[in-house]
Image: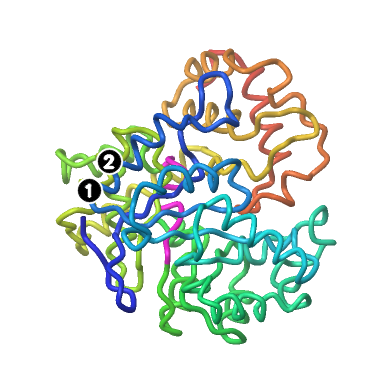
Amino acid sequence: MDTRLFKAADISLLGFGLMRLPRRQGKPFDIDYEASTELIEHAMANGVNYFDTAYTYGGSEDFVGHALSVYRRDSYYLATKCPPWMINGEEDFERIFAEQQKRCNTDYFDFYLVHNFAQESKRAAGNAEYFERFEKIGMYDMLKRKKAEGKIRNIGFSFHGTLEILRRTVEEYGWDFAQIQLNYVDWKATDAKAQYDVLAKKGIPAIVMEPLRGGALAQLNEASAAVLKAARPDESIASWGLRYAASLPGVLTVLSGMNSMPQLLDNISALSGFTPVTDKDKELLDEAAAIFSKSGTIGCTGCGYCLPCPGGVNIPSVFSIYNHARRAGFHIPFDNGYATLEEGEKASNCVQCGLCMERCPQHLAIPEYLREVDDYAGSGSANV
């Protein structure tokens, strides 16, 4: 496994994102400890040493505290995140931090992040941006104190906001690293390039999340995939996305939310003996991205932040099934997938309350997309 030097540490170029761990059959909110532990063991054995979790990743911190307990603490690097929308003052911060230490079975965090800077949420943050909330409660001083105590080694933030907020964030505070969404589609589509450039100018290492856009770039539509397969027939479609992100010099590690052994093996292969993308590769990726963007898919990464839905809609699953059909180019995959959902989970149950939009880090117009899916569901198999 290739590594990048960060201070005195060799960080694996592939980072293990722990938000999408395997779940128990029939229990989507319960982590499958046996299957997930097998992934952790194989990752560690093959040089993956960066593990990313969060306070709000349903059981993930508890799992990582269990799975990594058999390894020397200095043999891996642990990152977790603190949710500013749950912090009203120092007492809340201390309580959550202590709970995270207990869950993760650790005395310190190698990388500690303010979670999801600059997402707006009327429900959780009084319609104020999380960055403003962070400033108001003096959260940076709390983080610096923990760092001085040796309980945090490096302070950073994950980001889903505007370029203006990112510039303010890096100008007004000192950070050891930052985590941004970056891939060859979002490089232009959501101006990830500008975010990367802001960090690079300040010399802040970037942790990349969603290099495959929630798996969408590992399952391109046929026309997009053909562009890449013609150039490198022996390489997986997913490897292109990982290599693209890892080729940027300011990137420290590329996170992948791996939930199966084939995914893990493929990703390890892509970033071991790593070959950066060439200028010709970038041209091919631009071509594939342009075709992909016309496929009619919804830019959902399946993070689940939109849940629970007051109407009961299983938003990530609905969008995943729809996107699969749009990539395939015909209706039957949608019919088959949609039939596996309970009636109460389908798009028709959306009550248009808008809570999902406030929570969505991609800022998607989810109610509008659910209407689109519901229309598609009613159009029948004759529709392409």
**Vertical side of 171 occupied by 33: above or below:** above
Q: Which percent across, then down, holds residue 315?
A: 65, 33
For the residue pair 13 and 187, the one nearer the viewer reads as: 13
Q: Which percent across, then down, holds residue 27?
A: 58, 23
Could one spot residue 290 in this view of the protein?
no
Left or right of 221? Residue 338 is right
- The kind of residue on which mark 2 rests is His
Say the numbered circle drawn on residue 42: 2
- The kind of residue on which mark 1 rests is Asn
Q: Which percent across, then down, holds residue 206?
A: 42, 69
Numbered range of the magenta stretch: 207-216
**Vertical side of 179 occupied by 55: above or below:** above
Q: Secondary structure at mark 2?
A: helix
The structure residue drawn at horizontal position 43% and vertical position 40%, both measured from the top left corner, is 216
* Residue that numbered label 1 is attached to: 46
Q: Quadrant of residue 2?
A: bottom left
Locate the N terminus and report the quarter of the image it occupies.
bottom left
**Vertical side of 229 occupied by 152: above or below:** below
Q: Are marks 1 and 2 in contact (CB under 8 Å)?
A: yes
Q: Which percent across, then down, holds residue 54?
A: 56, 53
Could one spot residue 98 in this view of the protein?
yes
Left or right of 31? Residue 355 is right
For the residue pair 115 and 336, the one nearer the viewer reads as: 115
The structure residue drawn at horizontal position 71% and vertical position 29%, both measured from the top left corner, is 313
Instruction: Tell me if residue 67 is in the magenta stretch.
Output: no
Left or right of 247? Residue 58 is right
